[in-house]
Amino acid sequence: MAPVENMQLPPETPLNRRPRAVIVGASSGIGAALARRLAQEGMSLALLARREAALEDLCAEINQQAGETRALAYPHDVTQSESIPPLFERLLADLGGIDLFVYCAGFQYSPAIDEYDFAQDRQTLEVNLLAAVAWLGLVANLFQRMRHGSIVGITSLAGDRGRVANPPYSSSKAGLDAYLESLRNRLTRHGVHVLTVKPGFVDTEILKNAASKTFGVISPTRAADGIWMALRKKHQLVYLPWWWRLIMLAIRFTPSFIFRRLSF
């Protein structure tokens, strides 16, 4: 594989233009599966993640299958917020613009029921919420001026209520839920689509750190297919799989004096 800095997308013409997407958190799990799906749909991709080797392997796989350069790799640690504005400008220059932006980066640890670890809590909030706000604010400003574009934020069922098992993770996802809803309410009038994705249990690295027992686990590929379908249909909110919407509706309306006694 050629060095990242030497790779370029093939030239386009006004009559032969590919949609362009950016995925933050693309080296594995849902992000990697979605990158493969978007490439199959003909998009040019900028893929960002902290794990450089995994990211470059993914780009090599996508480009080999496409028979041309379809995906570019950009090593990036989302907690380094000062690097985000210049990197965003570089992405715009390399891609020639952006049509779709996906924030898929995530961090989770599983504290014991009596454990409070501020260093881990801070990293959870920085990756899951603060970095998302840093990226999405730039993208929202661009799309609002363009009057075009789609934003996807990967949140979690954990954001629907404050759970005893993991206060920082629930808080970070609830915060991202609210931020995405606010962006949607602000940007819809400008022709911009904002999709909130709430996956259930997906077979990813984060699932290995989940404290609660899991059921109904789906593959990252199935999650990516659900996201693509929701994008095509311009949905505002999607639970993956769909039946989680019914379960979480019951959980949201469970009285607090009962919910606080649950262990998940």
Image (cartoon, rainbow, N blue to C red):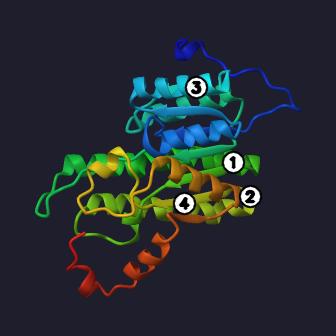
Question: Of callouts 3 and 1, which one flags the residue occurring earlier in the amino acid sequence?
Answer: 3
Residue 196's disc is 4
Residue 110 quadrant: bottom left
Dot 3 amino acid type: Leu
Labels 1 and 2: the sequence-earlier one: 1
Amino acid type assigned to the residue bearing label 2 in the image? His
Q: Nearest to the eye among marks 2 and 3: give it.
A: 3
Q: Which mark is residue 143?
A: 1
- In whole angstroms, how far apart are the C-alphas of marks 4 and 1? 17 Å
Q: Quadrant of the C terminus?
A: bottom left
Q: Earlier in the sequence, mark 4 or mark 1?
A: 1
Q: Nearer the viewer, mark 4 or mark 1?
A: 4
Relative placement, left or right, of 233 versus 157 is right
State if disc 2 and disc 1 touch (CB < 8 Å).
yes
Badge 3 is on which residue? 72
Q: Report the mark closest to the observer, 3 or 1.
A: 3
Count neighbours of disc 4 (C-alpha within 10 A) and say few if under 14, some if 14 to 19, many if 20 or more. many
Q: Nearer the viewer, mark 2 or mark 4?
A: 4
